[in-house]
Image (tube, rainbow, N blue to C red):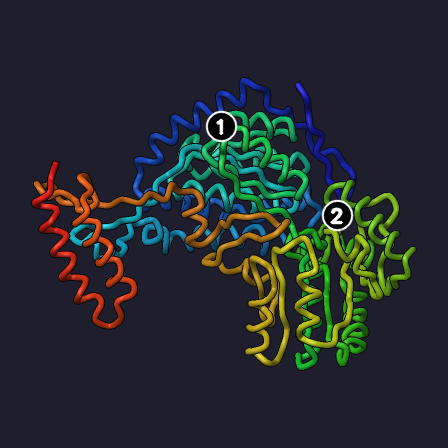
């Protein structure tokens, strides 16, 4: 049996070794999930929400111990773990506590005139067993949020964490310690091969968060079984800054947006575009603030009690990506104004700002996923929009301007699933908003009402009365009925103000013809 060694990225210490799931474990997990689904799908929405409140209460009571484990495996600072992991999970649960019953209730919709007498409804029903595959950068948040959402929608969930930050036993501890419904959410450990086997177990749907390359592979494997997928595949998020902003606030927003979670967020600010009249001031002030940020070895005390600003890079391979991007940029004329050299023998990368970056370079075009940000200038609003959209990604963005009409206008033109005006990454702080991207950032949405609907079979139902009436569009077809139908359509959709009244007359004629002309 293969094993995964999990290390503390800050110290290099091996924390534990976890065995990868074998075929028997995967089979038994899905069998248990499908048995649990029969019970979960029969529960009311309120009953399922009540189960998630057990998770909420357990996390609240044990949050410091949970944060200890997250920090040990990811190397992130303690405040990031509290705000971007714990808070988000609790807020999503609270949102569904208040709104899930309404979101999943049967919806009445209008019925057209020609279908008079019938009732139209939309039902949201569970799918079955859902597979969630989460990444290493937010190992609890991006695990529990989709798992909880799928469960509230009535599904059983099988969850595979990243092999880099599997948080062995933590999710199980939360579920079992809280008294959550047995087998409602189950954890399976392993790497890519285990992920492929989980897909071959034919879940009802897959939500995958990770790289574009891995997302394509998941989609390919899922396509063999026609399994629907939701993919969140990262970003190269732009920040557009116009000359009329409050410089102090905007620079602070840029600083946090670029460096939170050590830049290891799919919605991190990686590209900043500043209007030319403000560019020089912006660069000077951002550099000053970056150099005051605390990180391990630079004003950041360890162990972190909450005062560390930036942690370290989690997996070793991401250090290689960051080095390659910076080396290429330096060799092609870019200027690294501060930071830029990963500390030897560690996963610590000093916060880095780069200017004069050619758009063709990897640092400008590919996801760097580290505490690195580029700053470039633009002249006009049209140029800013063009630069922001000049990317294969489209996950998140921000627009900064004292003119809110312009902020809204530019936000609507940016090709992204999430846009913030005069703030950064804040769409993720509202659990009522859907989350997802366009282009190579993936497709599908979770969180908010769309999240529950994403894990539902959206079923259309029409109800008619029982009786002797024959529908006008049923057999037999006759010339007279054809002519009446044609006139009815003409009056309904092209008859002008009085068309509807005239259509009523022709509708009655059609009904009378139908009663007389039967098989």
- Considering the image in quadrants, where does the C terminus appear? top left
Judging by the rendered image, the residue that carries numbered circle 1 is 202
Residue 398 position in % (x across, y down): 62, 66
Q: Residues within 10 Å of mark 1 (few under 14, many from 20)?
A: some
Residue at (75%, 55%) from the top-left corner?
A: 365
Judging by the rendered image, the residue that carries numbered circle 2 is 313
Look at the numbered disc 1 and give the secondary structure of its residue.
loop
Q: Residues within 10 Å of mark 2 (few under 14, many from 20)?
A: many
Q: Is residue 484 left or right of residue 51?
A: left
The answer to whether residue 69 is seen in the rendering is no
Marks 1,2: beta carbons within 8 A = no
Could you give the CA–CA distance between mark 1 and mark 2, rounded to whole angstroms?
Answer: 34 Å
- Considering the image in quadrants, where does the N terminus appear? top right
The answer to whether residue 279 is seen in the rendering is yes
Q: Is residue 202 left or right of residue 195?
A: left
Residue 185 position in % (x across, y down): 47, 35
In-front residue for pair 16/363: 363
Q: Earlier in the sequence, mark 1 or mark 2?
A: 1
């Amino acid at each position: 049996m293969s094993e995964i060694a999990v290390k503390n990225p800050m110290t290099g210490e091996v924390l534990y070794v976890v065995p990868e799931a074998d075929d028997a474990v995967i089979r038994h997990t899905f069998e248990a999930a499908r048995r649990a689904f029969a019970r979960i799908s029969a529960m009311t929405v309120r009953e399922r929400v009540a189960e998630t409140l057990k998770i909420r209460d357990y996390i609240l009571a044990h949050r410091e111990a949970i944060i200890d484990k997250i920090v040990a495996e990811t190397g992130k600072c303690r405040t990031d773990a509290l705000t971007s992991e714990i808070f988000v999970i609790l807020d999503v649960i609270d949102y569904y506590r208040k709104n899930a019953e309404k979101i999943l209730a049967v919806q009445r919709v209008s019925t057209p005139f020609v279908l008079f007498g019938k009732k139209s409804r939309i039902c949201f029903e569970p799918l079955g067993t859902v597979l969630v595959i989460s990444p290493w950068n937010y190992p609890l948040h991006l695990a529990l949020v989709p798992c909880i959402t799928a469960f509230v929608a009535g599904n059983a969930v099988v969850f595979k964490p990243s092999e880099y930050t599997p948080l062995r036993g933590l999710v199980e501890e939360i579920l079992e310690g809280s008294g959550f419904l047995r087998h409602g959410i189950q954890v399976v450990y392993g790497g890519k091969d285990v992920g492929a086997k989980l897909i071959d177990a034919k879940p009802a749907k897959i939500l995958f968060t990770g790289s574009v390359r891995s997302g394509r592979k998941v989609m390919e494997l899922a396509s063999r079984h026609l399994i629907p997928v939701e993919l969140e595949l990262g970003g190269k998020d732009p920040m557009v800054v116009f000359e009329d902003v409050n410089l102090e606030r905007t620079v602070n927003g840029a600083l946090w947006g670029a460096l939170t979670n050590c830049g290891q967020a799919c919605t991190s600010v990686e590209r900043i575009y500043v209007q030319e009249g403000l560019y020089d001031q912006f660069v000077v002030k951002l550099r000053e603030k970056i150099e005051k940020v605390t990180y391990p070895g630079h004003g950041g005390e360890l162990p972190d009690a909450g005062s560390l600003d930036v942690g370290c890079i989690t997996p070793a391979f991401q250090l290689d990506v960051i080095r390659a991007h910076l080396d290429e940029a330096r060799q092609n004329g870019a200027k690294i104004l501060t930071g830029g050299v990963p500390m030897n023998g560690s996963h610590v990368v000093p916060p880095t700002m780069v200017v004069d970056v050619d758009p063709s370079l990897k640092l400008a075009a590919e996801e760097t996923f580290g505490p690195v940000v580029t700053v470039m200038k633009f002249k006009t609003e049209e140029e800013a929009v063009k630069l922001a959209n000049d990317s294969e990604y489209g996950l998140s963005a921000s627009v900064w301007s004292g003119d809110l009409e312009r902020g809204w206008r530019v936000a609507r033109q940016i090709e992204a699933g999430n846009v913030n005006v005069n703030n950064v990454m804040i769409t993720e702080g509202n659990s009522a908003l859907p989350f997802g991207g366009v282009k190579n950032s993936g497709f599908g949405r979770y969180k908010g009402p769309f999240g529950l609907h994403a894990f539902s079979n959206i079923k259309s139902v029409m109800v008619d009365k029982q009786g002797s009436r024959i529908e006008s569009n049923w057999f037999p077809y006759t010339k007279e009925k054809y002519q009446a139908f044609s006139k009815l359509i003409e009056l309904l959709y092209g008859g002008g103000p009085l068309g509807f009244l005239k259509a009523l007359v022709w509708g009655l004629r059609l009904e009378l013809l139908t009663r007389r002309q039967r098989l």
